Amino acid sequence: MAHAVVILAAGLGTRMKSKLPKVLHPLMGKPLVGYCIDTAFASGAEKVVVVIGHGAELVRKTFAGYQNLEFVVQDRQLGTAHALAQAKPALAGYPNSVVVTQGDTPLTRVETLTGLVEAIGDAGMAMLTMKLDDPSGYGRILRDEQGEIVRNVEQKDATPEQRAIREINPGVYCFDHTVWERLEAVDNNNAAKEYYLPDLIKLYRSAGKRVVSTESTDPGELLGVNSRQQLAQVEQVLISRLCAHWMAQGVRIIRPETVYIEPTVQLEADVTLWPGVILRGSTKIAEGAEVGAYSVLTDAVVEAGARVKSHSVLESAHLGAGSDAGPFARLRAGTVVEEGVHIGNFVEIKNTRLKRGVKAGHVSYLGDAEIGEDSNIGAGTITANFDGKRKHKTVIGRGVFIGSNSTLIPPITIGDGAFVAGGSGINKDVPEDALAIARARQENKDDFMKRKRESE
Ligand code: UD1
Ligand code: CA
């Protein structure tokens, strides 16, 4: 059952108070209308047309990679029927059903769309309905004694009796291919002086076509985003859905209401997430690994059994199996940590490989370096990788001991088994198994302080 989808998204979104078009506001890392577009394609749509208002160029650019997706512009917002009419050139002659959704309700489910496509049968139109305890603001559904839908009345146009009706129109429809000609008969004789899309109910019926419905009981589907507050509410619903999903897969989430997990993240069984964890982008966390409180991971890979301790930040970094990092560790782009590595607090690592068994326990900066197996990086070790113009590489062999507060000035290579004395500034290669000391020799002046005190 092939169908097309039209997404109405030309509303101005003035209540967002933003320069960014409303449809592009990010919701868990993905633009708002992207949810509707992905849902449309997931429902099997052959073609998706999005009706947009301002910011068309930016919107088109954002979705440039999509196939069978077209954007049409509605210059003036004259109502939902007028909005749909803008899609006519894009779908003229299309022989199958046309589903219509709203671009600011990102939680509309795939099954809702496929359900309407199945329900339409030989009726002219199928629409979603929902029963609400508080129907205020929505169009109300009027039915006859047989239970057939006869029309929709907007809140603004409704009598007090009609306002008491609890069955509402969520704004999701499926029309047969004749919808385009029928749209021309919609007028704007109503309180808002707008062309109302639900007026097609009357028009289909007067042409002898039935209007059928499916009902949704998921209140999330109704959640529209008109303000920043509603954006946050929708985000919370999405996060709770994701947490429920991951917990069902065996992930332990301590205080799920505090975490932020984007839909693109992948987790395995027995992963533990402590409160306040933020997981973004293509982050992948393998079996049994743990992420400590208030850590932020973006496009990071954490292998099985590894531990990211609290307040750490990982960005395009790889933490190997059984390794640990933090608290307060920062692993930047290009960091590759192999297995069984220990990274302690206040260690910043960038574009560096730490081979198996390396220890960097305290307060260091390691950039553009390669550190061999089982080497020990003392507290306060700094790679001075930048000379003001270019970045240079530090190569440290295996089993090396770098004493505390050493500055390694590359390009340099420190051979296997070498030892750098604490407080050294190293700018020449250190041969294998050598001891390198590069600091002023200590001098002790006997009784100097005693004499000073006595002369005062
Ligand atoms: C609409 C329905 C109402 C339903 C409600 C559900 C009409 C007349 N009413 O009302 O029965 O209960 O949705 O949320 O359809 N849009 C355009 N161009 C326009 C006007 C709207 O693209 O000229 C888009 C908006 O961006 C939005 C959608 O259509 O995504 C719905 O428009 P909105 O103004 O929010 O309609 P409601 O008044 O809420
Ligand atoms: Ca609305």
Image (cartoon, helix red, strand yellow):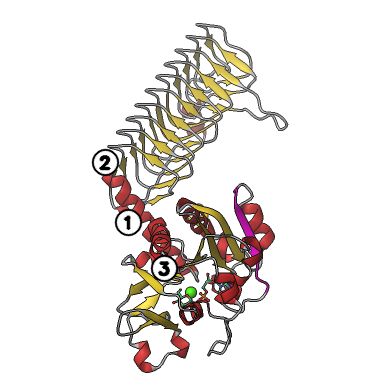
Query: Could you tell me which secondary element the residue under label 1 belongs to?
Result: helix
Image coords of residue 12 (percent x, y): 60, 72
Q: Judge left or right: residue 184 versus residue 135.
A: right
Q: Residues within 10 Å of mark 3 (few under 14, many from 20)?
A: some
Image coords of residue 237 (percent x, y): 37, 60
**Quarter occupied by residue 18:** bottom right
Image coords of residue 252 (percent x, y): 27, 44
Q: Outermost residue, front direction?
A: 208
Q: Amino acid at mark 3?
A: Leu
Identity of the residue drawn at 55% across and 14% down = 437
Q: Judge left or right: residue 160 versus residue 451.
A: left
Q: Judge left or right: residue 394 versus residue 203.
A: right
Q: Which residues are magenta?
A: 66-75
Q: Earlier in the sequence, mark 2 or mark 1?
A: 2
**Residues at marks 3 and 2, CA–CA distance in whole angstroms:** 29 Å
**Residues at marks 2 and 1, CA–CA distance in whole angstroms:** 17 Å
Q: Nearer the viewer, residue 424 or 71?
A: 71
Q: Earlier in the sequence, mark 3 or mark 2?
A: 3
Name above or below for residue 248 compared with residue 434.
below
